[in-house]
Amino acid sequence: MKERKIRLKSVEDAKNFVKVTTGCDFDVDLYDNSIVIDAKSILGVLSLDLRHVLVVSYNGENEELEAFLDDHMNGIEKIA
Protein backbone atom coordinates (compact mmCIF):
# COMPACT_ATOMS: atom_id res chain seq x y z
CA MET A 1 0.00 0.00 0.00
CA LYS A 2 1.39 3.37 -1.03
CA GLU A 3 0.45 6.67 0.57
CA ARG A 4 1.18 10.18 -0.68
CA LYS A 5 0.22 13.58 0.66
CA ILE A 6 -1.20 16.10 -1.79
CA ARG A 7 -2.98 19.41 -1.86
CA LEU A 8 -5.77 20.10 -4.35
CA LYS A 9 -5.93 23.88 -4.62
CA SER A 10 -9.03 24.23 -6.78
CA VAL A 11 -12.14 22.50 -8.06
CA GLU A 12 -10.30 22.09 -11.37
CA ASP A 13 -7.49 20.22 -9.56
CA ALA A 14 -10.11 17.97 -7.94
CA LYS A 15 -11.75 17.23 -11.31
CA ASN A 16 -8.38 16.40 -12.88
CA PHE A 17 -7.52 14.18 -9.91
CA VAL A 18 -10.74 12.18 -10.31
CA LYS A 19 -10.13 11.90 -14.06
CA VAL A 20 -6.66 10.44 -13.41
CA THR A 21 -7.85 8.04 -10.70
CA THR A 22 -10.70 6.68 -12.83
CA GLY A 23 -8.04 5.52 -15.28
CA CYS A 24 -6.49 3.29 -12.60
CA ASP A 25 -7.43 -0.39 -12.50
CA PHE A 26 -6.98 -0.50 -8.71
CA ASP A 27 -8.65 1.18 -5.73
CA VAL A 28 -7.58 4.70 -4.81
CA ASP A 29 -8.74 6.21 -1.51
CA LEU A 30 -8.49 9.80 -0.29
CA TYR A 31 -8.19 10.62 3.41
CA ASP A 32 -8.91 13.88 5.23
CA ASN A 33 -8.21 13.14 8.90
CA SER A 34 -10.74 10.40 9.76
CA ILE A 35 -12.80 10.76 6.57
CA VAL A 36 -12.13 8.22 3.82
CA ILE A 37 -13.65 8.51 0.35
CA ASP A 38 -13.29 6.76 -2.98
CA ALA A 39 -10.92 8.95 -5.00
CA LYS A 40 -12.80 8.01 -8.19
CA SER A 41 -15.92 9.84 -6.93
CA ILE A 42 -16.14 13.50 -7.94
CA LEU A 43 -18.86 14.12 -5.33
CA GLY A 44 -16.73 12.48 -2.65
CA VAL A 45 -13.62 14.48 -3.53
CA LEU A 46 -15.54 17.76 -3.69
CA SER A 47 -17.13 17.03 -0.31
CA LEU A 48 -13.71 17.26 1.35
CA ASP A 49 -12.15 20.49 2.58
CA LEU A 50 -9.70 21.25 -0.23
CA ARG A 51 -7.76 23.62 2.07
CA HIS A 52 -6.40 20.57 3.93
CA VAL A 53 -3.49 18.35 3.05
CA LEU A 54 -5.03 15.08 1.86
CA VAL A 55 -3.57 11.58 1.87
CA VAL A 56 -3.92 9.38 -1.21
CA SER A 57 -3.72 5.64 -0.56
CA TYR A 58 -3.41 3.14 -3.41
CA ASN A 59 -2.01 -0.26 -4.25
CA GLY A 60 -0.94 -0.34 -7.87
CA GLU A 61 1.18 1.29 -10.55
CA ASN A 62 0.04 4.07 -12.87
CA GLU A 63 2.45 6.60 -14.39
CA GLU A 64 -0.23 9.25 -14.90
CA LEU A 65 -1.29 9.02 -11.23
CA GLU A 66 2.31 9.20 -10.02
CA ALA A 67 2.96 12.28 -12.20
CA PHE A 68 -0.23 13.98 -10.91
CA LEU A 69 0.74 13.27 -7.30
CA ASP A 70 4.27 14.61 -7.88
CA ASP A 71 2.82 17.82 -9.35
CA HIS A 72 0.45 18.36 -6.42
CA MET A 73 2.76 17.79 -3.48
CA ASN A 74 3.48 21.55 -3.35
CA GLY A 75 6.28 21.39 -0.80
CA ILE A 76 4.61 18.65 1.24
CA GLU A 77 7.07 15.98 2.32
CA LYS A 78 6.58 12.44 1.05
CA ILE A 79 5.26 9.75 3.40
CA ALA A 80 7.76 6.92 3.77
Image (cartoon, helix red, strand yellow):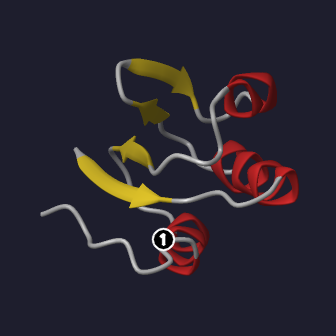
Q: Classify 43 as above or below 65.
A: above
Residue 36: where, in percent of width, then height?
A: 45, 21
Q: Residue at x 52, y 74 (%)?
A: 63
At mark 1, the secondary structure is helix
The crowding category of the residue bearing disc 1, from other C-alpha atoms within 10 Å (few below 14, some 14 to 19, many at least 20), is few
Which image quadrant for residue 13?
bottom right
The residue at the far right in this view is 12
Quadrant placement of the C terminus:
bottom left
Q: Amino acid at mark 1?
A: Glu
- Residue at horizontal 70 percent and vertical 56 percent from the top: 20
Q: Quadrant of residue 25?
A: top right
In the image shown, does 11 or 65 lie closer to the viewer?
Answer: 11
Instruction: Determine whether, in the image, residue 12 is placed left or right of residue 38.
Output: right
Occupied quadrant, residue 48: top right
Image x and y of residue 32, in percent: 45, 32
Task: Judge from the rendering whether residue 70 lies leftward or rightward of residue 43; answer left or right.
Answer: left
Q: Residue at x 67, y 34 (%)?
A: 40
Q: Residue 76: x, y in percent?
A: 37, 71
Residue extending furthest left?
80
- Is 36 situated left or right of 42 in this image? left
**Which quadrant of the figure contains the N terminus?**
top left
Q: In the rendering, at what x and y percent does residue 27 appear?
A: 47, 33
Q: Residue at x 80, y 57 (%)?
A: 10
Disc tally is: 1
Residue topped by disc 1: 66
